[in-house]
Amino acid sequence: MAAPTVISRPQKWSLDGLSTELLVLILKQLADVDSTSLSTARLVSTRFNAIVTPLKYHTLRMTRYIIAPQAEIYFPDGIANIYAHTRHVKVDSNVNAVYVRKILDNIERLSSISWRYVQDDLRKGDFWVPSDILPRRHAQSNKVKLYIENLPLQDFRSEQHNPYLRAIPTTLLVSLKMATPTPLLTTRVGSLKGLLLNSRQIETFWYDDRGQGTQFEFSGNERLPPFRELHLRSYDWNHTATTVRKHWDFSQIRCLEMANVPLGPFLRSVSFVDFRNLEVLRLDDFNVHLPDTRWDITKGLYILIRQIRGLVDLKFTCDTQSFPIDGILQHAQSLRSLCFRDYTGFSDEHRRCPTLKLEDLDTMSYALVELRVLELDMDEKRCEPHHFLRVLCNFRRLSTLTLHTQTILDPLEDTDTSTDLDFERSMQFLSLLQAKQGIPWRSVTINVGGWKPLMVRRFSAPWREQNNRGVYAERCFVMERQENGALIVREQLPRGAS
């Protein structure tokens, strides 16, 4: 007698059958995609509501509706969830500190406060400072981390006590991002230096000026805390090696970004060994207009980059012809974002911009196995564009590309405005890039003639005449992949342009 045939029925699968830990991970990712989706997920079941509620209230921005005295009467469950589940709070300086303080005093396990200044004066009108909102138990516990954004840069040397130190609990401060000072080029930063010297737990510092800016003046045994993340814009770095060794501490640095900073003095004054654990390095030299310094700076950059163990993000401008690519290849196993540009650029159509050799680009395309984002120069007079673009298609994990090129227009020729030569050339480039291998393109940008979001057009009389006719050397074309997978191409216009 034949054995009976057993037919197995497919098991029903349900999200509710997953472990709580796995559901938390899924719902966190769902919140990253669409934060409003958590409100819907709470309605699925009692279990989902219990899982989602702590996620929904984990981070809270204080609004006048939440801190209003009537909120506890009309929304008792919401306020109770804030007290039980909120860990991170975001506060603007124009909300009522008394009401905020009451909310914070009842939050059971507060971990951090992000404070954002919304005015340009530390003590103007009815605005508040961080020390006004912190209950005593949080201020004394040293368990709450304080993040400050847009702190106005002011000089208080005429006052007996530094108001920064009265306004900000320095024992809690871990991140400080300055507002751009008004007026620009503020040379008096003594009060800011005093705040940093007293903030021994600080890890992140952003200084943002315009123009060439200023620098700290040190005395005695003053020594800045060991920043992990340092961003300096328009900081006039002219410190000596002795000053840096005595007053700066780069032992914990992981992210360094400098824009409009004189890199020559910086590279000569620091010890490269201190930067061996850097993960992010972005450098923009202030003295790009001084050709005599370029070779020395490029050499210094190469030595610095070779000292670093494994960069994830690297952005710098140099004399690319004298920068050996083994400096980049050293980070092949870790590098995910690279911007490698030459000082020359494309702002002058009469100058040829050095371009990576085809064999070097080919080597990089196979060696940089983790690279996702790439920004390069490509001068058609220095390479064969078709071959150059085909090699770019060999970066298997690359998904975002920015390519800088020169305009093919000649301002002295009578340009036919019915034919857009730079547009047609850019479309040819984008068409050739369709042969991409591996991960498909997410975004490709063709930057023509040194285009910038805040554009200053070329000054010569022939170009001014062309500009009056609506013909420009500076253009920007972007190809982007949409959610449905389709690629669209658009022209990016400068800010303020219609």
Image (cartoon, rainbow, N blue to C red):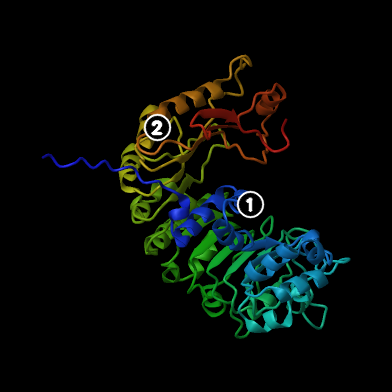
| Helix, strand or loop for disc 1 | helix
The amino acid type, in three-letter code, at marker 2 is: Leu
On residue 389, the disc is 2
Would residue 318 be found to the left or right of residue 87 on screen?
A: left
Q: Is residue 11 visible?
A: yes
Quadrant location, the C terminus: top right
CA distance for labels 2 and 1: 46 Å
Residue in the image at 40% along x and 53% along y: 335
Residue farthest to the left, as pictured: 1
Disc 1 crowd rating (10 Å Cα; few below 14, some 14-19, many 20+) is some
Residue 96 in the image, given as x and y percentages of width and height: 83, 67
The amino acid type, in three-letter code, at marker 1 is: Ser
Of the numbered discs 2 and 1, the one sitting upstream in the chain is 1
Residue 89 in the image, given as x and y percentages of width and height: 67, 66
Pick whichever, 168 or 62, lies toward us. 62
Q: Is residue 319 above or below residue 463?
A: below
Pick whichever, 347 or 174, lies toward us. 174
Residue 129 in the image, given as x and y percentages of width and height: 78, 71
Quadrant location, the N terminus: top left
Using the rendered view, name the quadrant where residue 374 is placed.
top left
Residue pointed to by mark 1: 39
Instruction: Give the number of callouts.
Output: 2
Residue farthest to the right, as pictured: 125
Residue in the image at 66% along x and 27% along y: 463
Q: Is residue 95 above or below residue 196?
A: above
Q: Is residue 218 visible?
A: no
| Helix, strand or loop for disc 2 | helix
